[in-house]
Image: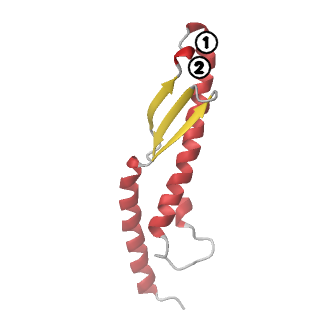
Amino acid sequence: MFDLMNIMSKVKEAQAKIKETQAKLVHLTAEGESGAGMVKVTVNGNRKVVSIEMDDSLINPADKEMLSDLTVAAINKAMEAIEIKIKEEMKSATDGMMPNIPGMDLGSMF
């Protein structure tokens, strides 16, 4: 039988660690690019776009639709990359804190 007090203590400890790690996520960044690097987007761990860089050759009113498409593609790639980093960060923050309960994955909660 599980030691309920120990489990509750571990849950509170995990919650504190998760909160601390979430505060650090703003410093975690990931980059996505499209068009062979012509458009680059950087996002942070709070899932916010930090910067967008575009090759000078793209700045042409006639290429507006292509530029929009490349920007969307780069943002989506950056968001995919930051999701992986967030899960890794949260998993390392809570690793070993909770008993191994099948089906309970704290890292997938974020």
* Residue for point 56% across, 52% down: 84
Coloring basis for residues: secondary structure
Give 107 or 103, whichever is nearer the viewer.
Answer: 107
User: Mark 2 belongs to which amino acid?
Assistant: Leu
Residue 67's tag is 2
* Residue for point 47% across, 39% down: 43
User: Mark 1 belongs to which amino acid?
Assistant: Asp
Q: Position of residue 21 (x, y in %)?
A: 40, 59
- Residue beneath disc 1: 63
Q: Position of residue 98 (x, y in %)?
A: 49, 76
Residue 80's tag is none
In the depicted structure, whether residue 80 falls above or below residue 89: above
In the depicted structure, whether residue 107 falls above or below residue 53: below
Q: Secondary structure at mark 2?
A: helix
Neighbour tally class for label 1: few under 14, some 14-19, many 20 plus, Cα within 10 Å: few
Neighbour tally class for label 2: few under 14, some 14-19, many 20 plus, Cα within 10 Å: many
- Asked whether the residues under the numbered discs 1 and 2 touch, taking CB atoms below 8 Å apart as contact, a structural biologist would say yes
